[in-house]
Image: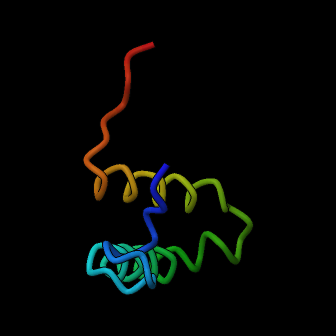
Amino acid sequence: MKDWTASEDGRSNSSTIYLKLVDEVDRLILNSAFDLIHGNSKAVAGLIVAQLAHVHELSPQKN
């Protein structure tokens, strides 16, 4: 399994895709500060997972 955090040359976590993902997750966390402060981390986790799925072009699977 390839480490998705590594750049294509495998030397660092400085790939464009990784840095973009970090920026987007950072924005989600900042926008969700109220939920985090009030103990609603599941809502924040859901947003982060949705963003990861979007970035990695994943879609929900049928049960």
How many numbered marks, from 0 up?
Answer: 0
Q: Position of residue 55 (x, y in %)?
A: 29, 58
The residue sitting at 41% across, 75% down in the picture is 10
Q: Position of residue 16 (x, y in %)?
A: 26, 80
The residue sitting at 36% across, 73% down in the picture is 21
Position of residue 59 relative to residue 55, above or below, is: above
Q: Position of residue 23 (x, y in %)?
A: 37, 83
Q: Position of residue 12 (x, y in %)?
A: 45, 85
Q: Is residue 42 left or right of residue 5?
A: right
Scheme by which the image is coloured: rainbow
Q: Is residue 55 left or right of residue 1?
A: left
* Residue reaching furthest to the right: 39
The residue sitting at 66% across, 62% down in the picture is 41
* Residue reaching furthest to the top: 63
Q: Quadrant of the C terminus?
A: top left
Residue nearer the viewer, 1 or 25: 1
Residue nearer the viewer, 2 or 24: 2
Residue nearer the viewer, 63 or 39: 63
Position of residue 51 relative to residue 14, above or below, is: above
